[in-house]
C-alpha cells in the first residue's frame, strides 16, 4: 500500500530560504538544493534569490529538457500544498515546449563564425595600422576598430554565458576566455555572475546589479534612502557626493558611458581577488594577464603620448555604444524593491524590459538586445531566432493584457534620459540632509 503524499504549505517552504537551508518547488514537488547550490553551474545567487518559492517558470527558462532527469536526486518527498498554475504560466510553458520541439534552441546559424571572423579581422587591422602607419588619423581609426572588436566580443561573451555557442563545452569555454578575458580584459566569470543575478531579479532595485550604479546614476528615488544591495551585500549610500552626481546624471550619462569599461575592468579584478568562489579562477586570471600584456604593449608602440591617449579614448568611446545599449533595455522600464517573485515570472520579465525596433539588416548592431523581452523570457534562445519568435511573444502578451514594450533606438535614448532627468530633479529637491561626504563610495563604484 502506497504511503500518502506529504504536503507543505507555501509559508513553510518560504522558511527554507538561506544558504544553509535552501528549498525550492518545481511543478509542485519540493526539492532540497542546499548542497547543489554550491556547485550549481549558474552560481548560488539565482537559487538564493528564488529560494523558498515555486520556481518552475525560471527552471523552464534556464534549463534544457535534459536537466529534468536530475531533479529526483534532490526530491524531499514533499509536495507543495495548493499548487496551481496561472493561465499565463500555462501558455508560457506551452510556448517554451513548442520552441524546443521546433529545434529553435539548437539552430544557431553561422553568426558565431561570422563574429569570430570579424573579431580576427578587426584585431589584425588595428595592430597592422598601429605598427605600419605613421598617420595619426589611421591610429585614431585603429582605436575605433579596437572598440568595435570589444563590442563583438561582448556579444559572444553574452551569448556563450546563456547557451553553448561552440560544438563542445570545452571549446565554448576556450572561446569565452579568448574573446572575453584575453581580447577584451573582462572576466567571463564576473560577467556570468553579474548577468545571471540580473536576469533572475530583472529590475529589482536591491537585487539587480545592473541598476546599482551609485554614486553616478539612479533610476528611482527609492535609492535616496540608501537601500541595501543584496548582490554586493552592502548599503548603497546616497551621500552628498551621490546627490551631487545624480543631480546632473542626465547630462553626464553619455560621457560616463564612454569610459564605463573602466568599471568592468575593476569589477573583474575585484571578483577574482576576492574570496568569492569563482570556477576556474586560474584560467580567468591568466586570460586577464594576457590582455594586460598585449594591450598596453600595442599602445606603447604609438609614437607619442598624445596618440596613445587618443587611441585608448577612441577604443573606450566606441565600445561605450554597447554600454548605452545595455542601459536602454531597462533604465526606463518598471522597477520594484524586494526579491523576485517566481509566481509572476512572465509578468516581471515583460514589465522590466524594453525592445528596440529595428530592421533585420541592423540586427548586427544590437547583438540580440533589440529583442530584450524575448531574450529575458527565453534566455537560452540563440539570437538568430529571436526575430522569428517575436510575433508569438507579442501575441501572448496581448492575450493576457501584459505590456510588450518597444521603442525605436532614438526614442529609447529619449526615454532613458528622461528617466535620469526625473530622478536628477528629485535629488535636487530633497529637503532632508544627507550624511557627510563618503569619498570611498565615489571611488569604489559598483554596478
Image (tube, rainbow, N blue to C red):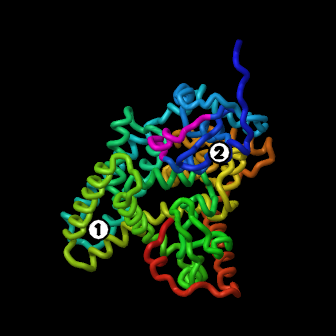
Task: Point out the image quarter for the N terminus.
Answer: top right
Q: Which residue appears at 37% of the width and 39% of the height?
A: 172
Looking at the image, residue 143 sits to the left or right of residue 324; the answer is left
Residue 220, position as x, y percentages in the image = 66, 70
Q: Residues within 10 Å of mark 1 (few under 14, many from 20)?
A: some
Residue 138: mark: 1
Residue 67, image x, y percentages: 53, 30
Give the CA separation, mark 1 to mark 2: 57 Å
Rendering quarter of residue 8:
top right
CA neighbours of label 2 inside 10 A, class few (<14), some (14 to 19), many (20+): many
Q: Is residue 60 left or right of residue 318?
A: right
Q: Which residue is mark 2?
A: 52
* Viewer-closest of 204 and 330: 204
How many numbered discs?
2
- What residue occupies the far top of the structure in this picture? 1
Span of residues in magenta: 31-43
Give the residue displayed 50% in from the left and 31% down from the top.
Answer: 106
Amino acid at each position: 500500500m502506497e504511503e500518502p503524499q506529504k504536503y507543505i504549505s507555501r509559508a513553510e517552504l518560504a522558511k527554507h530560504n538561506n544558504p544553509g537551508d535552501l528549498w525550492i518547488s518545481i511543478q509542485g514537488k519540493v526539492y532540497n538544493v542546499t548542497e547543489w547550490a554550491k556547485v550549481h553551474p549558474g552560481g548560488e545567487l539565482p537559487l538564493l534569490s528564488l529560494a523558498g518559492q515555486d520556481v518552475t517558470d525560471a527552471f523552464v527558462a534556464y534549463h534544457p529538457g535534459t536537466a529534468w532527469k536530475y531533479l529526483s536526486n534532490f526530491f524531499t518527498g514533499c509536495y507543495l500544498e495548493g499548487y496551481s498554475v496561472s493561465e499565463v504560466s500555462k501558455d508560457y510553458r506551452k510556448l517554451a515546449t513548442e520552441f524546443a520541439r521546433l529545434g529553435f534552441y539548437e539552430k544557431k546559424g553561422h553568426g558565431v563564425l561570422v563574429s569570430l571572423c570579424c573579431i580576427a579581422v578587426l584585431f589584425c587591422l588595428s595592430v597592422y595600422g598601429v605598427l605600419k602607419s605613421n598617420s595619426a588619423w589611421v591610429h585614431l581609426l585603429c582605436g575605433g576598430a579596437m572598440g568595435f572588436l570589444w563590442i563583438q566580443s561582448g556579444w559572444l561573451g553574452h551569448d556563450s554565458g546563456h547557451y553553448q555557442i561552440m560544438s563542445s563545452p570545452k571549446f565554448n569555454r576556450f572561446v569565452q576566455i579568448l574573446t572575453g578575458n584575453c581580447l577584451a580584459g573582462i572576466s567571463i566569470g564576473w560577467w556570468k555572475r553579474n548577468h545571471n543575478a540580473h536576469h533572475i531579479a530583472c529590475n529589482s532595485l536591491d537585487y539587480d546589479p545592473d541598476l546599482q550604479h551609485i554614486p553616478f546614476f539612479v533610476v528611482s528615488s527609492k535609492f535616496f534612502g540608501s537601500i541595501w544591495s543584496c548582490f554586493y551585500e552592502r548599503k548603497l549610500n546616497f551621500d552628498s557626493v551621490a546627490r551631487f552626481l545624480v543631480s546632473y546624471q542626465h547630462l553626464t550619462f553619455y560621457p560616463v558611458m564612454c569610459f564605463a569599461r573602466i568599471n568592468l575592468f575593476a569589477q573583474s579584478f575585484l571578483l577574482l581577488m576576492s574570496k568569492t568562489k569563482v570556477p576556474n579562477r586560474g584560467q580567468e586570471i591568466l586570460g586577464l594577464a594576457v590582455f594586460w600584456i598585449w594591450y598596453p604593449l600595442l599602445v606603447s608602440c604609438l609614437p607619442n603620448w598624445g596618440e596613445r591617449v587618443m587611441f585608448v579614448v577612441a577604443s573606450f568611446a566606441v565600445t561605450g555604444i554597447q554600454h548605452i545599449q545595455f542601459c536602454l533595455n531597462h533604465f526606463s522600464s518598471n522597477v520594484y524593491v524586494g526579491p523576485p517573485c517566481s509566481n509572476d515570472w512572465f509578468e516581471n520579465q515583460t514589465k522590466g524590459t524594453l525592445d528596440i525596433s529595428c530592421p533585420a539588416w541592423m540586427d548586427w548592431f544590437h547583438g540580440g538586445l533589440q529583442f530584450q523581452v524575448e531574450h529575458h523570457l527565453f534566455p537560452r534562445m540563440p539570437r538568430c531566432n529571436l526575430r522569428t519568435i517575436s510575433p508569438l511573444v507579442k501575441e501572448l502578451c496581448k492575450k493576457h493584457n501584459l505590456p510588450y514594450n518597444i521603442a525605436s533606438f532614438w526614442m529609447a535614448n529619449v526615454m532613458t534620459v528622461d528617466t535620469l532627468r526625473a530622478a536628477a530633479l528629485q535629488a535636487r529637491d530633497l529637503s532632508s540632509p544627507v550624511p557627510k561626504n563618503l569619498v570611498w563610495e565615489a571611488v569604489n563604484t559598483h554596478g
